[in-house]
Amino acid sequence: MASREASAQAINAIALRYPWLIGGSADLSPSTKTNLTFRGADSFEPGQYGGRNVHFGIREHAMGTILNGLALCGLRPYGSSFLILSGCMKPPIRLAAMMELGVI
């Protein structure tokens, strides 16, 4: 089994029991398999704020920043991208580490 498939199964199992787990990816969810797929885990969209799948678009830096903000609000956010694109996320990753935020 591919590690991203195992990760998808694990994150869906955990999210069923923890309603404050929310996240997504920067336009890569089909590849990184970060979408929550169980019933009720819809997309977070205008007018539909109960969703737990966030679609950040092609914005790794903004995704990291948004995840930090969600963590400051008491949620447990997660985000996914390819390692090569993590350079775009250096500032929000550094802030999350310095602030000891629980961003996954």
Image: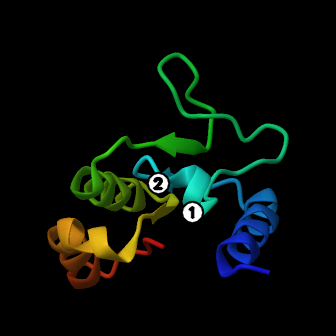
Specify the quadrant of the image occupied by residue 97: bottom left
Q: List the residue tagged with mark 2.
A: 25
The numbered mark at residue 32 is: 1
Q: Residue at x 60, y 51 (%)?
A: 30
Q: Can you give x and y, in whole percent of width and height, for residue 41 in the image? A: 72, 41
Looking at the rendered image, the quarter that the N terminus falls into is bottom right
Nearer to us of marks 1 and 2 is 1
Q: Residue at x 20, y 73 (%)?
A: 87
Whether tag 1 and tag 2 are in contact, CB under 8 A, the answer is yes
Q: 42 and 98: which one is in front? A: 42
Specify the quadrant of the image occupied by residue 43: top right
Compared with residue 22, is residue 45 higher up or lower down, i.e. above or below?
Answer: above
What's the amino acid at mark 2? Ser
Q: Residue at x 55, y 52 (%)?
A: 29
Q: Seen from this angle, which residue lies furthest left?
A: 91
Query: In this view of the protein, can residue 21 be seen by the observer?
Result: no
Q: Can you give x and y, in whole percent of width and height, for residue 65 in the image? A: 26, 56
